[in-house]
């Protein structure tokens, strides 16, 4: 019994927090456990979670990407514009992903070749890209009326909302890459010990650049989904999403210094944030108070995480 | 063995969640003979602006006067958050949904979801460009812009250089006020618009924009800001440049801070569109609808030109 308890608190600590929250949420509001509401939460969480998947790769190498929100908006804006001008869904999708990947490459090159800390490069690109969005959209949203485009954000396949399917595919793919490919092992190695990785002959610059391309690509994908969901590319889209993505990754137990973490707990982390937002709205809590509550939960979760990580280390030592 | 216990724990957890879904869908019992309380969902575009805070306060007064349960959400000026807010509100099955959109195009997706859920939708202040809306309550924004334009032209004796500072151009209100203002000014051939910029209805942004315009234009005779928040920001910039005595400034809304500024002789005028009554009337219309009454498709409240002369006579709240 004690062993199950410790396992719950250590290996599955993030999942345990989520389940506790679900239990409390059910108790607090009748509307919480309806199918409609659960689908809402999943669909809303999908947006941040996909960005967080990209952020996962970056943080595992010991880096950070503050520009994902801006990349999301830019990819969404260009995708919307392409859809309106060419009426080609294929082009609109490809463009969103390409723009995201290209901006990620931009980040990666400055970080590796320029040897500038990721925080600074992505802070600069966050501002630069947001400016590009404003210039491109002239400060006004770009509406998209194509229903086939909007299916990406609003459609369902066999009753399952499309964004959730994309979310599942993204995380399964991410899991496979991180656990079963050489690239995945290089990512962990780079974050764990940079010098040792370099000495063992692994191409650090290549690995590091690729993680930023992945982050950019997934941000572009998210921009596509968000634009499709709203039927409109907003110049202010994605504002603050980088912080939500980072919070999800941290809540999932990944270490900010890199080298340690897993991808599925990141979804759980994103779910924790999403369920929290959802239950605060369902309980009609003032939005001001809601922000305070959210901050406290993140603090407590991270505190608990570090406490239980030590417990896990002690348990393994026995 | 370790793998088996992992699978077992996940199965247990999924099973627990599944059973929770089963018993979570309770049906609400109602006491026979007791009149059901009306539930109204209010999706606000933002609460980070005294104008909209007053809309909410007016709505709360209307709710208190009519035994209405009011659930309010704050989209923080983000269309994507407003979609999420409305999805969450729909889950709580309100009798009516009142919406003040962040963006007149992006709100359509959300209104369509409410339409699908068979919840009647009212819009206040800003209109929507699609979806089924039972009634729109607002101030005539074109008339407001025209009143401002005519006032400014007359105050300058039909001759001079003026500046227009616009609101969030994705909204019907900003577009209409600008339209009205420009059509009024076009009647006066000796009035020239030397600068036209948006400050997104935000005080801090307007201060920055006005500072730059003051630098670029050594002679300015009049300024029109599409709302009082921006007018107050512009006032700060103009006062700092020591040009307040040479510039006639008019805003829109008649918020408390603007009233103080007009009484102090800084801002010269505004258009009274008390947000408090917008909220209160919105709720009262919703109650009328629930009780079987009919509403006109478009209900316009009256805007009044306010200057130092009549400022004390204008009532802005109950």
Image (cartoon, rainbow, N blue to C red):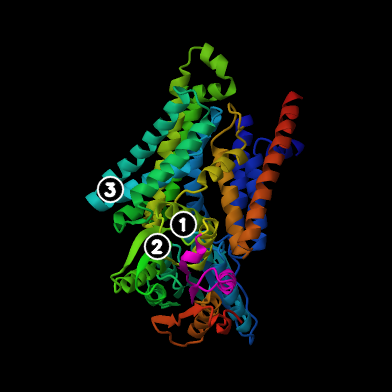
Q: Chain of mark 1?
A: B
Q: Chain of mark 2?
A: B
The image position of residue B11, as x and y in percent, is 59, 43
The residue that mark 2 highlights is B163
Span colored in magenta? B243-272
Toward the viewer: A40 or B231? B231
Describe the element under mark 2 as helix, strand or loop: strand
Residue A82, numbered label:
3
Query: Does B309 sit above or below residue B80?
Result: below
Discs 3/2, front: 2
Binning the other alpha carbons within 10 Å of mark 1 as few (below 14), some (14 to 19) or many (20 upward) gives many
The image position of residue A221, as x and y in percent, is 40, 43
Task: Tell me which residue sits at (52%, 32%) in the image.
Answer: A120
Q: Chain of mark 3?
A: A
Describe the element under mark 1 as helix, strand or loop: helix
Residue B210, numbered label:
1
Residue B125 is a magenta residue: no
């Amino acid at each position: 019994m004690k062993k199950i308890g410790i396992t719950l608190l250590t290996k599955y600590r993030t999942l345990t927090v989520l389940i506790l929250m679900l239990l409390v949420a059910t108790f607090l509001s009748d509307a919480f456990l309806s199918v409609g509401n659960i689908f809402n939460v999943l669909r809303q969480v999908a947006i941040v979670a996909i960005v967080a998947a990209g952020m996962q790769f970056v943080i595992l190498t010991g880096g950070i990407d503050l520009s994902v929100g801006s990349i999301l908006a830019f990819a969404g804006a260009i995708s919307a514009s392409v859809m309106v001008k060419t009426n080609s869904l294929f082009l609109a999708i490809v463009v969103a992903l390409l723009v995201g990947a290209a901006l990620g490459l931009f980040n990666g090159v400055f970080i590796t070749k320029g040897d500038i800390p990721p925080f600074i490069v992505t802070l600069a690109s966050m501002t630069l890209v947001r400016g590009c969005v404003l210039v491109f959209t002239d400060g006004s949203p770009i509406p998209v009326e194509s229903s086939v485009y909007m299916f990406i954000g609003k459609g369902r396949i066999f009753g399952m909302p499309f964004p959730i399917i994309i979310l599942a595919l993204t995380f399964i793919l991410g899991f496979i890459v991180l656990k079963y490919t050489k690239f995945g092992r290089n990512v962990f190695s780079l974050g764990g010990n940079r010098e040792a990785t370099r000495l063992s002959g692994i191409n650090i610059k290549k690995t590091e650049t690729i993680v930023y391309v992945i982050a950019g690509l997934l941000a572009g994908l998210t921009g596509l989904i968000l634009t499709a969901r709203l039927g409109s590319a907003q110049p202010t889209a994605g504002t603050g999403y980088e912080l939500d993505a980072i919070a999800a990754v941290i809540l999932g137990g990944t270490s900010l210094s890199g080298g340690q973490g897993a991808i599925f707990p990141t979804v759980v982390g994103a779910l924790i944030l999403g369920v929290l937002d959802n239950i605060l709205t369902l309980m009609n809590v003032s939005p001001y108070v809601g922000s305070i509550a959210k901050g406290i939960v993140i603090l407590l979760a991270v505190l608990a995480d570090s406490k239980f990580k030590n417990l896990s280390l002690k348990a393994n030592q026995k | 063995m370790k793998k088996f216990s992992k699978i077992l724990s996940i199965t247990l957890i999924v099973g627990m969640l599944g059973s929770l879904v089963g018993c979570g869908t309770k049906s609400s019992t109602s006491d026979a003979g007791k009149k059901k309380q009306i539930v109204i969902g209010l999706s606000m575009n933002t609460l980070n602006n005294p104008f909209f805070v007053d809309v909410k306060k007016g709505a709360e007064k209307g709710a208190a006067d009519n035994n209405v349960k009011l659930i309010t959400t704050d989209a923080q000026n983000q269309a994507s958050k407003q979609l999420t807010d409305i999805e969450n509100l729909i889950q709580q099955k309100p009798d009516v949904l009142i919406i003040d959109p962040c963006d007149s195009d992006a709100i359509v997706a959300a209104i369509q979801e409410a339409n699908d859920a068979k919840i009647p939708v009212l819009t206040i202040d800003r209109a929507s460009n699609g979806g089924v809306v039972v009634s729109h309550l607002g101030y005539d924004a074109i008339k407001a812009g025209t009143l401002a334009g005519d006032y400014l032209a007359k105050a300058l004796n039909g001759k001079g250089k003026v500046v227009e500072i616009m609101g969030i151009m994705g909204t019907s209100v900003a577009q209409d006020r600008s339209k009205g203002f420009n059509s009024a000014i076009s009647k006066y051939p000796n009035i020239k618009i030397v600068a036209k910029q948006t400050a997104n209805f935000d005080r801090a942004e307007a201060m920055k924009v006005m500072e730059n315009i003051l630098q670029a234009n050594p002679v300015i005779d009049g300024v029109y800001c599409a709302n009082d928040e921006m007018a107050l920001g512009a006032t700060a910039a103009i006062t700092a440049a020591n040009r307040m005595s040479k510039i006639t400034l008019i805003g829109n809304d008649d918020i408390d801070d603007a009233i103080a500024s007009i009484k102090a002789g800084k801002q010269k005028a505004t258009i009274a569109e008390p947000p408090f009554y917008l909220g209160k009337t919105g709720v009262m219309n919703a109650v009328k609808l629930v009780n079987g009454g009919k509403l006109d498709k478009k209900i316009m409240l009256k805007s009044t030109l306010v200057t130092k002369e009549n400022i004390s006579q204008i009532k802005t709240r109950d």
